[in-house]
Amino acid sequence: EHLAQSFKDKASLKSSTTTAASTAAATAISRNLSLASMLWAHPQHLTNTKSSSTSTTGGTTTRPKRSNSVSSVDSSSNNSHSAANDTLTMASHEENNFPPSFYASRPHFRATVMEAIQEIIIDLEALKDNIDEQASSHIHAGEVVLTYSRSKTVDSFLKAAAKKRKFSVIVCEGAPHFGGHAMAKSLADEGIDTTVIHDSAAFAIMARVNKVLLPAHGVLANGGLIAPSGSHMLALAAAHNSVPLVCLTGMFKLCPMYPHEGQDTLQDLVSPSSVVDYVELSDQVMASDVEFVNPVHDYIPPQLINLYVTNIGAFQPSYIYRLLAEYYHSDDWESFE
């Protein structure tokens, strides 16, 4: 009896030790599961993956069972470790789908990005000063300069030139927003001889003008210019009278885009309410027979522009294409071609 009792005690101790070891192993495996492996352990993932596709055995098609079904629990009680290993294998397989650069360690990435942002901030803060330093090289004494509407860059450029030169400025009012009125007042307050004209009088006055200064909304890769609406009229009048047209802009406005489809694709159209009152639009004749187009910008082709004065120097439109390689990576601007 004593021998039988000791044998039973040893057998129960061995079985409990085995159970504890298997429980600890299962716990260790569960702790090592990543978020992806836990997601892949869900029934919907197991049934939708390639590894869980239907299998045919002896002419009978069997489908994977739900992990929470009674039959699956009974049949998989002896294969818990293999199921956990399969789950880990699937998780590692999914994680390996990322490119190698995804796992690369970049300890200095944050510092590089912060340095690049700081360089951009410095360039923007010193933008006007770098352009104004070139004012005396492009504006001479006694000249008549024509500009359009209002621009802070052009305003600062003319004020810098007025410190060393005495000249006259003609400002187109820039209807319908009439920004030229505020521009003329700002220049007159600095003692610059300023005259405001209607936009329609630009061609008539162009014969007396020595130079045309225009601001930029954007500079395209082919050297074309996106300027305020009405600027294209000045460019055509300047080209007809052989008057040089100079654009003042910062290099941050350089855009790796080409005008493939013409001016219409680069245009923003806004409500005609700034041109015609809504009461007039309610008239039957106006509403049915008249079409109102109120563009925001004009596209000026590069052959109508003589020079770009930027914060890094003056360039002809044909050289703008070369500047793309300095300010854009080839992978960034080749997609716009």
Image: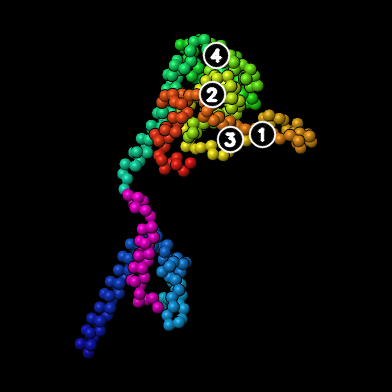
Q: Secondary structure at mark 2?
A: strand
What is the three-letter code of the residue carrying label 3? Answer: Gln
Number of other residues with Cα within 10 Å of mark 3, as a class: few under 14, some 14 to 19, many 20 or more: some
Q: Secondary structure at mark 3?
A: helix
Q: Nearer the viewer, mark 3 or mark 2?
A: 3
Residue highlighted by disc 1 = 293
Mark 2 residue type: Leu
On residue 144, which mark appears?
4
Report the front residue among 231 and 217. 231
Q: Is residue 200 visible?
A: yes
Question: Gap between marks 3 and 2, in whole Å?
Answer: 18 Å
Q: Are marks 4 and 1 in contact (CB under 8 Å)?
A: no
Q: Looking at numbered disc 4 in the image, what kind of residue is underneath it?
A: Val
Q: Earlier in the sequence, mark 1 or mark 2?
A: 2
The residue where tag 2 is placed is 214
Crowding at label 1, few (<14), some or many (≥20) Cα neighbours within 10 Å?
few
Identify which residue, 25 or 162, lies in the foreground: 162
Q: Give neighbour class at mark 4: few <14, some 14-19, many 20+ (Cα, 10 Å).
A: many
